[in-house]
Image (cartoon, rainbow, N blue to C red):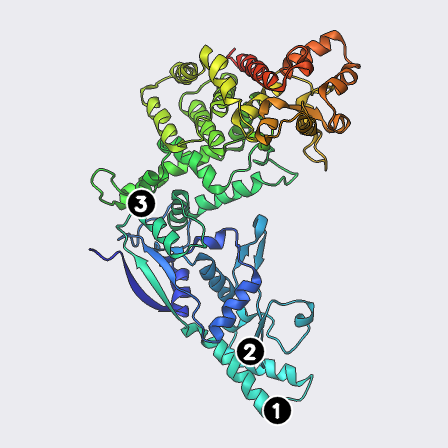
């Protein structure tokens, strides 16, 4: 059996140099740094004491040296070793020794500063007290600064300390020895395993999981992002920036920020790949971007450059802020105005792929496109189209586009897919059966909430629209809208309904203002219904009963019969809302 890896030994200085010149690709210097400074401190402490600190796992990047990069990178050569395991450890070493900034949580730039007390070999994360203490070298980065002579640093440190107190000859020797010992960590030995360039990315991910059970599982997007760091670092940084800005509002200028979805970099990458390559399976894209011919298995530098250019063009359109926000309007039209009523990010990402295709490739009228994608997204969310095997289903959907050549054909294709699933039997049989669940994150439940937004429904026993109540809860300590048991839990227990799953059925929930929820408490429906309806006209009551799918005299029904009847009425409300999303 062929060996899948080889062992190679390095010293620290060689590793740092290989990162500088580009032999080793280190993407994490541009990514969110997750290690604490205390963990970095412990790393240097262990190395200073001569303890082993683990090994690195690299993946050889094939015979692709001295080839053109995408964008305006400054590397001298193209990295041929991609770090797979040990990224945070390698980032820590590089950032401290070279004095490089890293990104903290929320992508705030900062430097890792570790202080060192030469007299007793203590490493600390500096604070106000150590900053004023001449016993410490404030930042060990100075030890490896090429502009600072180590002997001058040592002499200056001792001279400054002598100004404060007497030093014995033994203390001076200890200080000198420990400063030089720290400097000599350049020679600290590391072992690395270098994986064969010809093994598959699935095998690499499997190796990573098996040897590092506490690490995060790698996926194909991780490999592609690493590959982007090698050949198109600017593109990766664009993805990171988009993701960062989508998660927090700067308050000034245009931004991808919104309240519906805050995608990670790898999720936006899926959109670029889906749009640019018409593929959903990321493992294919990884091979393509490496310049591999999927039929012959051969690699080509020219092919790799061409495919990265294709990704660049797709990413430019994907990250266009105007396009992004026009797409988000489609989700709002579909009633999905908050992230917490989404059951699947994939459904959002794939809807964005279709939006990009319709807008850029088929020039579908923008108003028509937003209505079409709103209907498509509602349909995909309601049916859970991309929650089982999302990549497989999306691959099938994208293949169907091969026969599409015009805006009209694009619209007809999505409409046909919808109509083939959403039949009369779906509304009358399938959907009521799907609603027979107690899942708090049911796609059918969230589609019902979205339906109330589409229909302009008011909250139960409220004169305020559900849309306003949902949005009103965005920045308050108490949500303006709450799920309420129509037959309260305590009441059902008193009535002998002991099964919690039965008590928490979707059909027993309604959206009410939180103060009404408190007033209702554990009263029986017969007790609270009369008072709750006393402020509403006959017409308002009729609308309320329709929106909230309440059978007439529901408060007098047996609980099980009420659940059956209400599921049917909820399905009708969803159907009515879906009809409103029809293309004009």
CA distance for labels 1 and 3: 61 Å
CA distance for labels 1 and 2: 17 Å
The extreme bottom residue here reads: 169
Q: Is residue 207 above or below residue 537?
A: below
Helix, strand or loop at label 2? It is loop
Q: Relative to residue 245, is residue 394 drawn left or right?
A: left
Residue 492 at x, y percent in the picture: 66, 26
Give the residue at mark 1.
168
| Residue for point 49% across, 52% down | 30
**Residue 80 in view, yes or no:** no
Considering only order in the chain, which callout, 3 or 1, is on the residue closer to the N terminus? 1
Helix, strand or loop at label 1? It is loop
Q: Quadrant of residue 464?
A: top right
Q: Which mark is residue 121?
A: 2
Circle 2 crowding by C-alpha within 10 Å: few under 14, some 14–19, many from 20: some
Circle 3/circle 2 CB separation < 8 Å: no
**Residue 341 or 201: which is nearer the viewer?**
341
Q: Which mark is residue 290?
A: 3
Q: Quadrant of residue 334?
A: top right
Q: How many marks?
A: 3
């Amino acid at each position: 059996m062929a060996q899948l890896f080889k062992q190679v030994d390095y010293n620290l200085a060689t590793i740092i140099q290989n990162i500088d010149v580009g032999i080793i690709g280190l993407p994490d210097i541009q990514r969110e740094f997750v290690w604490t400074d205390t963990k970095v401190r412990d790393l240097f402490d262990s190395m200073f004491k001569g303890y082993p600190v683990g090994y690195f796992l690299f993946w050889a990047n094939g015979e692709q040296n001295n080839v053109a990069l995408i964008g305006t990178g400054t590397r001298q050569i193209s990295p041929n070793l991609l770090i797979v395991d040990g990224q945070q450890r390698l980032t820590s070493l590089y950032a401290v020794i070279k004095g490089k900034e890293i990104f903290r949580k929320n992508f705030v730039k900062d430097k890792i500063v570790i202080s060192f007390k030469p007299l007793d070999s203590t490493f600390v994360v500096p604070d106000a007290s150590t900053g004023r203490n001449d016993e410490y070298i404030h930042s060990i980065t100075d030890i490896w600064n090429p502009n600072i002579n180590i002997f001058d640093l040592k002499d200056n440190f001792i001279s400054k300390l002598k100004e404060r107190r007497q030093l014995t000859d033994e203390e001076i020797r200890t200080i000198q020895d420990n400063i030089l010992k720290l400097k000599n960590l350049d020679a600290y030995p590391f072992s690395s395993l270098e994986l064969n360039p010809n093994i598959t990315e699935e095998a690499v991910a499997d190796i990573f999981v098996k040897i590092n059970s506490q690490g995060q599982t790698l996926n194909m997007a991780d490999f592609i992002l690493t590959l982007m760091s090698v050949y198109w670092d600017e593109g990766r940084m664009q993805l990171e920036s988009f993701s960062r800005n989508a998660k927090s509002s700067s308050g000034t200028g245009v931004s991808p920020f919104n309240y519906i979805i805050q995608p990670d970099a790898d999720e936006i990458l899926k959109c670029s790949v889906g749009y640019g390559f018409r593929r959903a399976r990321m493992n294919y894209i990884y091979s393509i971007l490496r310049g591999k011919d999927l039929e012959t298995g051969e690699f080509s530098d020219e092919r790799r450059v061409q495919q990265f250019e294709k990704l660049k063009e797709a990413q430019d359109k994907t990250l266009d802020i105007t396009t992004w926000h026009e797409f988000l309007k489609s989700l709002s039209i579909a009633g999905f105005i908050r992230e917490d009523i989404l059951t699947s990010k994939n459904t959002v990402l794939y809807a964005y792929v279709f939006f990009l295709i319709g807008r850029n490739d088929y020039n579908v009228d923008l108003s028509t496109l937003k209505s079409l994608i709103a209907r498509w997204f509602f349909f995909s969310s309601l049916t859970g189209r991309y929650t089982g095997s999302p990549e497989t289903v999306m691959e099938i959907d994208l293949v169907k586009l091969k026969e599409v050549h015009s805006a009209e054909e694009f619209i007809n294709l999505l409409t046909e897919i919808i109509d083939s699933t959403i039949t009369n039997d779906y509304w009358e049989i399938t959907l009521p059966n799907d609603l027979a669940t107690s899942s708090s994150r049911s796609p059918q439940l969230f589609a019902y909430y979205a339906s109330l937004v589409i229909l302009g429904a008011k909250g139960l026993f409220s004169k305020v629209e559900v849309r306003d109540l949902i949005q009103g809860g965005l920045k308050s300590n108490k949500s303006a809208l709450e799920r309420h048991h129509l037959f309260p839990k305590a009441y059902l227990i008193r009535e002998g309904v002991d099964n919690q799953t039965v008590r928490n059925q979707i059909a027993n929930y309604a959206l009410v203002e939180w103060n009404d929820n408190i007033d209702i408490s554990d009263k029986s429906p017969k007790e609270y219904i009369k008072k709750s309806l006393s402020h509403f006209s006959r017409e308002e009551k009729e609308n309320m009963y329709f929106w909230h799918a309440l059978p007439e005299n529901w408060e007098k029904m047996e609980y099980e019969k009420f659940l059956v009847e209400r599921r049917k009425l909820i399905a009708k409300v969803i159907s009515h809302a879906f009809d409103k999303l029809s293309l004009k």
